[in-house]
Amino acid sequence: MKKNDFVVRFAGEGGQGVVTSAEGLAQASSQVGYHSQTFATFPSQILGGPTWTQTRVSTTEVLSSGDELDVLVAFNEDAYESHKSDVGKTGVVIYNTGEFQLDIDGESFGMPFDDLAKSTGNTRAANMIVIGALAYLVNMPQAIFEQFVTRRFTRGRPNDAEIIKSNIKALSLGREQAEKSGFSLGALVPPNKPDYEQIMVNGNVAIGLGALSAGLDVYIGYPISPSTSLLIWMERNLSGPGKLAYQSSSEIESITSIIGAGYAGKKSMTGTAGPGFSLMSEGLGLAWMSEIPCVVTNVQRGGPSTGLPTKTEQSDLLTAMFPGHGDVKLPVIAPGTIEECFNAGIAAVNWAERYQGPVVLLSEMALSERQQNIPKPDVANINPEIRKIYKGENGYQRYEGWELSPMPVPGTPGSYVANGSEHDGMGDTTHLPERHVQMTNRRFSKLKLLENESYESVNPQFNICIMPWGGSKGPALEAYEKLIESGEKISWLYTMFLNPLPTELLQLLKDKELVLVPELNYMGQFSSILRTYGVRAESITQFTGLPFKVRDLCSRIVEKIKQHQQGRMPS
Amino acid sequence: MSVKNPEYDFKWCPGCGDFGVRRAIDGALKQRLIETERPIEENVVVAGIGCSGNMVHLLEGEQPYGIHGIHGRSLPIAMGVKMANPELNVLVVAGDGDFLSIGMEHIAPQAARNLDVTAVIMDNGVYGLTKGQSSPTTKIDEITSSTPYGKQEESLDPLRLYLTLGVSYVGSALSSKVKDLTSMIGEAMSHRGFSIVHVQSPCTTYNNTYEQLKGNAKKGIAPIAWNIPEDHDETDLSEAYRIVDTGGVPLGVLYKSDRPSLDQRIASKSEKMKPRDLNKLIGSYSI
């Protein structure tokens, strides 16, 4: 039987090649036209610790990392024990006999990863031994991987040729081992190579590329998992005249310094995760109050306090929208795919300039570590927002009126005080009731400038709807497609623009009998927000630190629909 | 605000030291405009909160840009402004509570970076606007509204702190000696790097220290403020420490060091860096 889809998990210790194997398989497969997606989860320690990654290769776009494994690659015995239950009925386990032995069970075969690598003369080629074996199991031509290896190690170094040779030898050795084992999973259907150019990036790089495409000038951040890779990326890539990437001494310094930069006319961003975001609360209030454009990217991790630093969760939505004291409701953009991470990077920078205030780009760990092939963005088609700038004389009333007004830039006429206290038109502190009314209305009225963004709507004729947010989009969409195929009558609504919601979308949501919201948190954060708008929303929650599995979602959605129908019909 | 604004109802108490500081800042800014022949809008005053934070609304001369931010964070806000546009002259105004208690964590990194801003600190040894609680520079055993049995902590020695953290210009002044303060603020603004002008600016309501600072011959009170001798070598750090060790309130410039500021370092690094071509950068991820 031919396969359209192939899911492999690599499990072992950090440092054993678990990550490079997953990314290598994904890269090589995408180069020849397959779609692929990786998923990774790590312990919070520098070296070692149980680590696993997963690669899904498919002939169509990959929406989730896959529930059942076709192959489990176990680098050690603990990994085998922890993950064997996820192997599907027809799946295979490849294990490292250099670490442990299994009895012949008809479901696994072993090979000595490290000894085989050593025999190629390159002890670091173990991952290519594994990939060689995997290629055989699904009948992928070895040439694909030989090309990949050649490309990857052609780096202009004197030992390139040697490394390429040893890695190709490793591919062959792995292939021979798989052949000897007698296992086969059925050939993978040949790929439909897309007729457009593609890139392969993770979520944080995609956000970075998007932000730079929108004209980001300044990025100031403090290291914190899982946002650190964005800081490192910015330090390397946000350079040149007028650009600055800088490591701060705390998240409080990050937020306040990007406010300073935004005030001085720059498109500015910081990146952080939960604990750092909490420290930014007061600063975000200042940016909202004094109407200064800036973007905070919060790559969510799990739990309150230090929580689960290296796991994924969607539990910062409420704090993203309502980060601090007083009447504040921040714009939030939560991308659900790697492509959306790129678009969210653009949109967040644009929004901050358009409404002159702080914007939260709410990503999550599962996106930040995921590598995926996406269409290569066309920079020529991106329209960076240009801030409405004041160009008059001194004596300007910067905050006069009930709506957005042009913003002066220091260095040019139009001096005013950007004030975190309630203020009058010039920015001077005031306690007059009518001023607080005017300014509060003014700050909220600006959100209207953000209400016309795009959303997805499928099968709008059905009264029950699925509306996931953020990274739960992928598994939810896969579940949705399965449920439609099996005859369920449900509609699909989705947007990454969570606040403000596109006006039309909100109306569609209000018209539904039931809106089911799959989300990775305990409290059902998005559905609770939707209910405040009068939407009949209910959450499907999970808080394991891992993304949803498609089969779990399918059964929970069906169950919810059944409950709803029973509740509605007279017994 | 240069014109009286009826909506703005904040007032310093009669005799407040901050009046003198305001005259000095107004004077130093005015002098700077004449000397540099640059417009007022190239100057930004960043304030924290409290009595000192209101400085940004109360300046009387030509109006610079201002930020009246949140408690303790004037330095990092100023860093963002300065790094966004190194052409701007950035002045921080803060009190001892704002700068040395809640905001203390921000002094060390800016000293290490030698951020080119000037901080004018109005030290009155008390939280005035919240009505008289103890601050880091309140003396030990002093009774305040938050220390009814006397303050339990040693008072902080700000000048020693600045020297230790590596602040590249450290000056000490009195709010009542406006002429000296004006020229010190002017010099600090011209200094390339992180400059702090620490001003004794008494709170007439909660901690009136005029008499201690300036002395009262009639009552036989010797002044604790004293002038740093003119032959003091401002580039000698150990001499600066010696002045602090002498005690009291030394008046004058304790220390000055000439080293590259953060924007200068970044500018020289940027010259070596090619601006990224976005298309090429995206292309580097092609498959």
Image (cartoon, coloured by chain):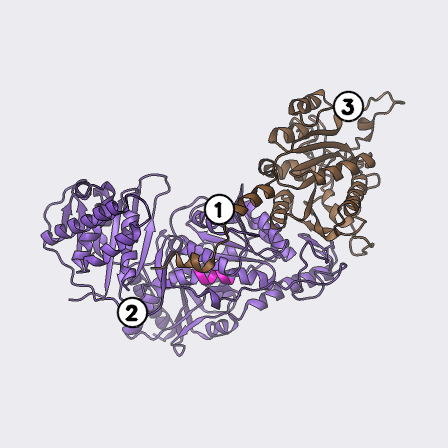
Residue at image x 9%, y 55%? A182
Query: Mark 2 is on which residue type?
Result: Lys
* Residue closer to the observer: B220 or A374: A374
Labels 1 and 3 positioned on one and the same chain: no
Task: Tell me the crowding category of disc 1: few under 14, some 14 to 19, or many 20 or more residues within 10 angstroms, Cα based.
Answer: many
Q: Is residue A452 above or below residue A301?
A: below
* Magenta region, residue range: A342-347
Which quadrant: the C terminus of chain B? bottom left
B286 w.r.t. B260: above or below? below
Q: Position of residue A221 (x, y in %)?
A: 51, 47
Q: Along the horizontal axis of the image, is A467 left or right of A89?
A: right
Residue that label 1 marks: A275
Residue A561, magenta (yes or no): no
Which mark lies nearer to you, 1 or 3? 3
Q: Position of residue A54 (x, y in %)?
A: 28, 54
Disc on res. B229 = 3
Circles 1 and 3, Cβ within 8 Å, touching? The answer is no
In the picture, measured across the screen, residue A219 lies left or right of residue B96, that is left
Specify the chain shown as purple: A
Q: Secondary structure at mark 3?
A: loop
Which is nearer the eye, A336 or B80? B80
* Chain label for disc 1: A
- In this image, B52 relative to A270: left or right? right
The residue tagged 2 is: A482
Give the residue type that dot 1 points to: Pro
Q: Secondary structure at mark 2?
A: helix
Q: CA distance from mark 1 to mark 3?
A: 50 Å
Which amino acid type corresponds to the residue marked 3 in the rendered image? Pro
Q: Please give the letter of the chain rendered in brown.
A: B
Q: Marks 3 and 2: which is nearer the front?
A: 3
